[in-house]
Image (tube, rainbow, N blue to C red):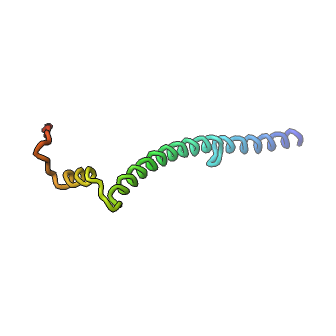
Amino acid sequence: MTLALYAVSSLAVTYFLFHAQHGARGLEARGAIRESLREMETELATLTAERKSWEQRLALVRDDSIDRDLLEESTRANLGRTHKNDVVIMGR
């Protein structure tokens, strides 16, 4: 009887230890979640920097006086025009 009690309790402990390590909320899953969190934080930092860059460019256009260089750059890109003094390098 005592041996059966030890066997059942050791099986129960083994079951819970196995799932504590390999289960859906176990230690391995915790490491995977931390890794995905690091990737998301890196992506967030990249997107935040990109947003600040866009906000700076929009601030130049929103003011009472529009930045002429930015206006010229955007019109040339949209219209595909060049200035007579520009050097155009043709690629393949």
Depth check, front residue: 83 or 10: 83
Figure disc tally: 0
Task: Residue at 42%, 52% (x, y): give it.
Answer: 51
Query: Percent from the top left, x then y, of residue 80?
Result: 16, 51
Quadrant location of the C terminus? top left
Quadrant location of the N terminus? top right
Farthest front residue? 65
Depth check, front residue: 18 or 44: 44
Query: Percent from the top left, x then y, of residue 60?
Result: 34, 55
Query: Percent from the top left, x then y, of residue 58?
Result: 36, 56
Depth check, front residue: 16 or 68: 68
Q: As drawn, is 89 to the left or to the right of 2?
A: left
Query: Percent from the top left, x then y, of residue 68?
Result: 26, 53
Q: As drawn, is 33 to the left or to the right of 59?
A: right
Farthest right residue? 2
Determine which quarter of the picture holds residue 87. top left
Task: Residue at 24%, 50% (x, y): give it.
Answer: 73
Task: Residue at 74%, 40% (x, y): give it.
Answer: 14
Task: Residue at 68%, 41% (x, y): give it.
Answer: 18
